[in-house]
Amino acid sequence: MAQRPPREVAELGRPETPEETAARKAENSRLHRQRQTVLNLVLALGASLLVVLVIVLIVPRSDTALERDVDVAPIAEQAQVAIDDQLAVPELPEGWRTNAAELRTSQVDEVIAWYVGYLTPSDEYIGMYQGFEANPTWVAGLLARTLATGTTTIDGVEWTVYDNRDTGDDVGNAEYGLTTEAGDSTFVLLGTGTPEEFETLATALTPTIDALR
């Protein structure tokens, strides 16, 4: 059988040398492996996206917001062991819900406070803080360092009002607030509820406030 003549390369205008042939084949092999690697990556990515899509489709979802409904009384009973002042457990009308109840300690000044988070009938938020031996810095921190806008008397108790609903500043949840003191307790109500809802909560706190005076 006649030996095949060396392959002539147009770019060179002559047959390629054995070294050039070996280099060309090595380069072709490298490019092939590179293309295979890219293809494998694309296929792996596609498979991962497919798995995510399947999970999203099969996991049941609900449009209903997850809201805890906490029973405050037993939590307060357990927490009362560590606190001398009577903990406030206001009795509120139907439509109010509670999503948290716990003792909290401020990291700034170590003030201990009894906290209860409420969801109002209008689906707004009001947080109740009962701080023990609290200081003005603690109160100011809760109310986003806003200034008092007046006072009001609710069920015989005088409260300081912080109405920040029309401010352009970022006050977080402190859109509206009420504060008062009784004994060693400082009560702070803050949130996004209506003034009428704040008044309802403040009225429910009156028995505790009277007992602490």
Image (tube, rainbow, N blue to C red):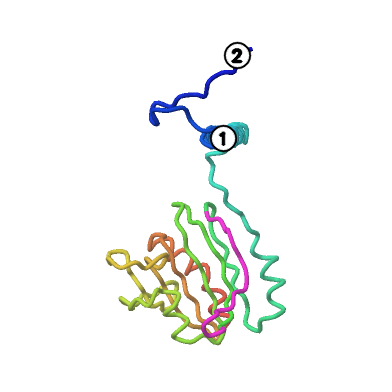
Residue at 54% from the left image edge and 37% from the top image edge: 19
38 vs 29, nearest the viewer? 29
Tell me which amino acid carries mark 2: Ala
Dot label at residue 192: none
Q: Which of the two discs, 2 and 1, sits closer to the camera?
A: 2
Extent of the magenta region: 96-110
Q: Nearer the viewer, residue 79 or 63?
A: 63
Q: Is residue 106 magenta?
A: yes
Count how many numbered circles sit on residues in the image. Answer: 2
What mark, if any, has residue 22 been given in the picture?
1
**Which residue is labeled 2 in the image?**
2
Find residue 86 and report its image quarter. Answer: bottom right
Q: Residue furthest top?
A: 1
Q: Is the residue 108 above or below the residue 58 in the image? A: below
Residue 24 x, y percent position in the rendering: 52, 34
In what element is the residue under mark 1?
helix
User: Principal SS element in the magenta part?
Assistant: strand
Label 1 is placed on what type of residue? Ala
Q: Image quadrant for the N terminus?
A: top right
In the image, what residue occupies the spot 32% across and 64% down? 165
